[in-house]
Amino acid sequence: LKSVFLMCRAVLPGMVARGGGAIVNIASDLGILGRERYAPYCAAKAGVIGLTKSLAREFAPQHIRVNAIAPGPVATAMVSLEHMSAEWVEKELAIPQHRLGEPEEIAATALFLASDMSRFYTGQVLGPNGGGKTTLFRILSTLLAPTRGRARICGHDVVTEPEAVRRRIGIVF
């Protein structure tokens, strides 16, 4: 949470000076669901979601969009199935697609949120998760209802020019 806050604090003045921009924060579906024995992690990711929503409301008048991605389990070093007990593997794969997400699938969501295709999105949390418990419908219907915002999901592939997007909004990979 601290690193997300510090990064937002560092890039926002430049975005205000340029007259706009987009911030994409990374949270986790566990920031919404919680999980036993993961309280600090879940609390930090819930904090990222709250920070995202607050900054979105504060900086929308300056044409700065702030959104978050709350992915389900993704095949990374942090979620290494071969080092988990059978009980934890079952928990991680207890989603309709019965597989972990791939980092590229999360990156595609980030590119969409950073692109002009999402110019009406701010304060939103997208949850690529293989059909897990935090589907976009559930997030929108429970967490985002108070914002009276509307999300439009594109039924086609998002095509962006990553270099142009990175230059425009100052993303560093």
Image (spheres, grey):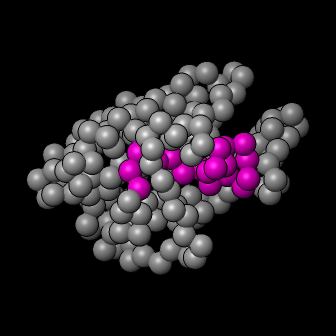
Horizontally, residue 117 falls left or right of residue 105, namely: left
User: Which quadrant is the N terminus positioned in?
Assistant: top left
Q: Which residues are magenta?
A: 121-139
* Residue 168 at x, y percent in the picture: 25, 66
**Vertical arrangement, residue 167 with respect to residue 142, above or below:** below
Instruction: Determine the image quadrant of residue 100.
Output: bottom right
* Residue 23 at x, y percent in the picture: 34, 51
Q: List the single residue furthest toward the left.
A: 17
Please state the total of marks drawn on the protein image: 0
Is 133 in the magenta?
yes
* Residue 153 at x, y percent in the picture: 55, 64
Q: Nearer the viewer, residue 52 or 146?
A: 146
The answer to whether residue 85 is visible is yes
* Residue 54 at x, y percent in the picture: 35, 35
**Vertical arrangement, residue 101 with respect to residue 71, above or below:** below
The answer to whether residue 3 is visible is no
Which residue is rendered at x = 31% and y = 40% of the image?
Answer: 57
Horizontally, residue 9 falls left or right of residue 53, namely: left
Is 99 in the magenta?
no
Magenta segment main secondary structure: loop
Which residue is rendered at x = 41% and y = 56% of the image?
Answer: 121
Horizontally, residue 147 falls left or right of residue 154, namely: left
User: Which quadrant is the C terminus positioned in?
Assistant: bottom left
